Structure formats: structure tokens, C-alpha cells
Amino acid sequence: MADSEKISACVLVIGNEVLSGRTKDANLNWIASRCTEKGIQLAEARVIPDEEDVIVDAINECRQKYNYVFTTGGIGPTHDDITASCVAKAFGVKIERRKEAVELLETFIKKENLNEARLKMAEMPVGAELIYNPVSKAPGFRMNNVYVMAGVPSIMRAMFEGFSESLLSGEKVLSKSVACYLPEGAVAKGLSKIQQNHTRFDIGSYPFKISGKFGCTLVCRGTDEEELEIIISEISELIVELGGKPIDEDLVTPEDEKRPDDY
Amino acid sequence: MADSEKISACVLVIGNEVLSGRTKDANLNWIASRCTEKGIQLAEARVIPDEEDVIVDAINECRQKYNYVFTTGGIGPTHDDITASCVAKAFGVKIERRKEAVELLETFIKKENLNEARLKMAEMPVGAELIYNPVSKAPGFRMNNVYVMAGVPSIMRAMFEGFSESLLSGEKVLSKSVACYLPEGAVAKGLSKIQQNHTRFDIGSYPFKISGKFGCTLVCRGTDEEELEIIISEISELIVELGGKPIDEDLVTPEDEKRPDDY
């Protein structure tokens, strides 16, 4: 695939515990950042429950729609870990216990402790390729464009890093920001005009409040470096015109907690 | 609706900044917890980009599928805030500037600063009901079963608290947990049997590692208090049978960071 084509991806976070509020997902933001770095456009993310029909449907819908599907969760040894069998069902293939996977488990778990539950972690759809798990050996797997990873963040990250070199990279989306202590409502009109003149770019506005002062960070994203610089200059000029001062985005923190309503 | 019926909900997090990895969503977990407290079953969550077609389709799919749809993001004054017009399109109605909303804005923004961009925050689909924003006045709105809220967490929370009394409550899902310093793979078989004997309940297993010791928290969720106590007793007995000791779940932290692979 040519570098200039868009490569899209979707994340499926699988787990009742995220939907009940018990567990805060800690994977989506990390995968999103890694995709952006690689020029892969994360187009959607879904959190879905440990329910076979829902998982099968989501996998089938998303693997048609996007270049890559990254799933997290549901590949452990307990009865609520059903991701592998759901992926098999989605692809219409059987599930099988893989010798290489059992051997990997044996490097981490004493043979006498390798019970049926733990051996479940060596089961995957026929045709799947193992995803290496340097942390605890129990592998994930790739089935065509669907990458099935653990939900435990340290393991998920190690798995992703292991295969990320093999992912196609789209044209890298460059991002540049400029911030100012003007409220969003003041810059909105001028910013909208700049956006209209540069339709290949996405310009976003994100409010903040620091020490009681309202401001916003204006983020510009696109693939052409030269045009990106031009847009940032235009935004900076707009800020000056409005009586503000363009400041380095690093001086503001993009954490939601620091964002108020800053209309 | 009878109390015993299931009330379902879906969260739509709208914003490119979450998908690019720039911003960590800080709303989903909070809404999930509040839904659980109210007996509303959060069945799905999606993160989608600031793209009209995607937003319209997601709203139309989810409002049919679930009792409630809660959206966050995209209701500010800038060009990338398109949620209100997308909801109007999804419902096939026009968007209109609402007098009550303008009056609310006037209590917060000086009249001379109330430009077209800011007035956009007073526009909503014909037939919508305002959602009060005690933080910064710019209202959200409800269109049938779709609740449109700000993305800024403090505002979103205040909006949700304002209307949450009016939401239907389903039968409350009770949750009880017991933890132990046994790895998941050891309890899996017995736990699966307990699950099979109590099909109206969801039993989940969540690994952790504290000071180098592997363990798991076993979480049981369902609506019948008596049966819940029985299940927790059975799980506790299982732990003892396996040579472990049931411990209070509060002694372990459900944070993902503390979870290792604990097979």
C-alpha cells in the first residue's frame, strides 16, 4: 500500500468491568498515541461487554470497515475470557490448542500447574498467528487484520510494541499547536475562516483555565509540513489581531481537569 | 416502566482529540459508575470523530438500540463543534436558536461579547429540552432519549447530576467482591462451576500483583441480594479449598497499573 493512503484502525475494549465503572480503561489513549505516531488513523473505539454476540458482531463489522482492529481484554484463563472463541466464530473457523503456545506457557508456569484453565490461554482460531508476550508468555494472536491483546496494560503494550513494526504506516499526520489566553468564543470566527481556507487540515480548539485565566489551545493536524507552518502563522496572527499573545502549547496542560468551560 | 425491567444506555464520546491520543477521555468511567449506581446498564461506549456522517449514524443506531444515549463533546462555539447540528440531522429536524438559551448565555457573557460563535451555543434541534449547565450556563440539551452534554468533565458532571433524577432506574445491580492471593488460573475451574450454577449472575475475575504477590479479585454482579451472598460464600469456600485465604477487596486496588499478568 502506498504511503500516501490512509491506514485506519479501530480499538475494541472488551470487558464488563469497564462498562460497570469498576475499571478505568488504561489502554485506549496509549494505542491512540501509538497509532498517531505511526501514521495510522484511529477512526473509532468501542467498549463492549463480555457477550459473545456483541463481540462477534463488533469484530465482523470493524474488520471490514478498518485496516486494523486492535482488541484488548478477555484472553485470560477464566470463564469470562471469551475473546478467542468469539474471534474464531467471527471468522467462521474452529478454535484449536496451539503447541507453540503451550510451550510458551511451560516456560512460565510449572508443568504440574498447567491445568485446563491455563491451557485455554493456548487456544486460538485456526489460522491465527501468535503475538508474543514478553511479560507473562501467554500469547495474544493476530487473525488477518484483527490483533487480539491482553487487557493488562503492561502486557498489551509489550504485545503491541512487538508487532507494531509490521503494521502499515499511512502518511504521517503532523500536529502543531498554539495556545493563547483568549476564550474560544473570541477566536472562533477567525479560526473558522482559516479552517475554510485549509480544508485538508483539521483545526481543533480546546479550552483551558489556568490560575483563573481562560484560554484555548488551537491544534492543527494534517500531512503537509509547509501548509501546517502557514496555518500556525495565520492562527498566531489572528491571536495578535484579537489582542492576545500566542504562547507555547507546552505552557498549558491538555488535561481535562484543567479545562473549564471557557466560552 | 416496571422497576424489574432492564434500562440500557450507551455513551458516545465525540472528539478527534480523544482518537488522536491528545486527550484522555475523563468522562466514560464517571458516567459508567453513575449508571451502575442508578440501575442503568451501560451496554456500550463509542469514541467517534468530529465527522457529521459518523455522528449522525451513531446517534441513530444507538438511540434505537438503547433506552438512553449520553453524548459528550462538540457543543462549544468553534467550527469543530458540530454535535447539535448532527443530532438535528439524525432526528430529521431543523436547528434553531433558543431564546431561553440566549438568556442563559447573557447571564455569563457580556452582551457586547455575545458574538455569532458564542450564540451558536444557544442553537439546538427543534423540540429539544435544555439541559442546565450550572458551571458556565451554555446549556446542553435532550432530544427524546439522547442527552447531549459538554466534553469538559466538570460541566458534563454538573449537567448529568441535573437530569439524573429524571432517568428511569432499572433493577439495581448489586456487586460484591472477594479477593485472594491465588492466581486466576488456580481458581478458574471452580469459579466456572459456580458461574454455571448461578446463571443470573455475572462473575468476573480480575488479576492483580501487589508487592510481587499474584492474586485476583472475584467480582459478582446481579440483582438478588440473597443469592449474591450465597455466591460470595461459595467463592470464599473455593478459595479456602485451594489453600488460599479470602481477603477484603478493599485491600487490593483495582487500578490497572497494579495488575500484572497473573496467570
Image: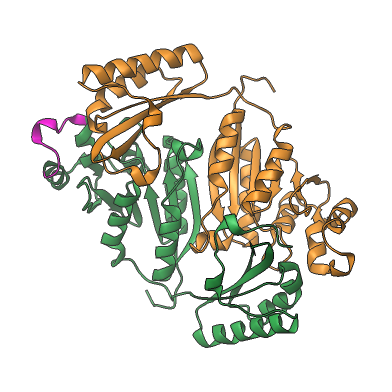
Chain colours: A orange, B green
Q: Is residue B91 visible?
A: no
Q: Is residue B226 visible?
A: yes
On whether residue A172 falls in the magenta region, the answer is no
* Callout count: 0
Q: Is residue B80 left or right of residue A158?
A: left
First to last magenta residue range: B107-116
The location of residue B210, given as percent across then percent down, is 63, 63
Q: Residue at x 22, y 16 (%)?
A: A241
Residue A248 sits in which quadrant? top left
Position of the N terminus of chain A by quadrant: top right
Q: Is residue A118 left or right of residue B249?
A: right
Q: Main secondary structure of the magenta part?
A: loop
- The one nearer the camera, B147 or A45, is A45
Position of the C terminus of chain A by quadrant: top left
Q: Residue at x 71, y 61 (%)?
A: A76
The location of residue A14, given as percent across then percent down, is 60, 55
Residue A86 sits in which quadrant? bottom right
The location of residue B47, given as percent across then percent down, is 48, 45
The location of residue B89, given as percent across then percent down, is 35, 41
Q: Is residue A164 left or right of residue B220?
A: right
**On screen, A98 above or below B250?**
above
**On screen, B257 above or below A110?**
above
- The one nearer the camera, A216 or A62, is A216
Residue lying at the far left in this picture: please name it. B111
Q: Residue at x 67, y 82 (%)?
A: B197
